[in-house]
Image: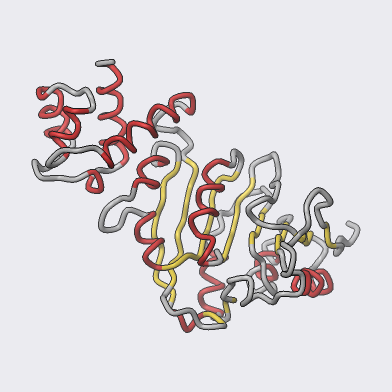
Amino acid sequence: MSRNRSVRTPVSRPASPPGRATAGAHELGQNLLVDREVVDRVVDLVPDADRPLVEWAAGRGALTLPLARLGRPVEAVEIDPRSTARLARVVPANVTVTRADILRHAPPSDPYDLVCNVPFHLTTPVLRRLFTLPDWQRAVLVTQWEVARKRAAVGGATLLTAQWWPWFAPRLDRRVPAAAFRPRPSVDAGILLLDRRAEPLLPVARRRDYQRFAAAVFNGPGRGLHEILVRQGLSRADVRRWAREHRVAPGALPRDLDARAWVVAFTVASRGR
């Protein structure tokens, strides 16, 4: 195998915005992982599969080098030119370093797994982009603690989680203390797992209609889910039957539903249209 330590830089767009070409990791909003136990846990959560790995926001390689030891092809994506230059000097042959904006990066067109220590200020854009990419199978993400909890529907689901639940299964792994990073952030982080469902709860062709329905329910008027769903086209008899089947309390709110309850409510509402 030939060694591949070159840095690939997209030519269609500057790798960093004007004025940020020499910015360091902290200036780019990144808190670097320095806790070996956390790094080992992230690597352990990567599935044992024969497919490439993509690491977004690779920074200075705290995760890159342990991921490389899995023996799989790794693409490490980082916007900071100093970090990419350093990585290119130290990575083994199975790692390609790409200097790019993770919100514009073009990942492989075949199945792969993704790892990212998410820059906290980019959490929502990263998640929204990730959900629209077609080929990744598992994403292991380090995000702000409250974001990790919300996306895993711990204590209640958010609209973003509900809108993508039929196609992706989120899970909260653990809390990561702020002391695990340098510079130290003001809040703790969490490890969030996202798995693409092998059998989606809805066909992709129905995604747009389902997501409109979820948004209408989350934002719809009414005192409690029963009234909201009636206003979305379900009969009162259908709502009572649905609530019994999914153990939805009379005073429940949209954030209290699980993935299957959402899908069945949407299916019943669609039949009435």
Residue beneath the point at 63% across and 53% down: 103
Looking at the image, is 76 positioned above or below residue 254? below
* Horizontal side, residue 184 vs residue 147: left or right: right
Give the position of the N terminus as an image quadrant.
bottom right
**Which residue is nearer to you in this view: 181 or 246?**
181
Position in image of residue 261 (x %, y %): 25, 36
Q: How many marks?
A: 0
Give the quadrant of residue 108.
Answer: top right
Give the position of the C terminus as an image quadrant.
top left
The residue lying furthest to the right in this view is: 2
Position in image of residue 189 (x %, y %): 44, 71
Residue beneath the point at 25% across and 30% down: 265
**Which residue is nearer to you in this view: 83 or 76?**
83
Position in image of residue 39 (x %, y %): 56, 73
* Horizontal side, residue 145 vs residue 221: left or right: right
Looking at the image, is 184 positioned above or below residue 242? below
**Which residue is nearer to you in this view: 51 or 17?**
17
Q: How is the image coloured?
A: secondary structure
Position in image of residue 9 (x %, y %): 82, 57
The residue lying furthest to the front in this view is: 19
Residue beneath the point at 69% across and 47% down: 107
Looking at the image, is 254 positioned above or below residue 139? above
Looking at the image, is 104 positioned above or below residue 94? above
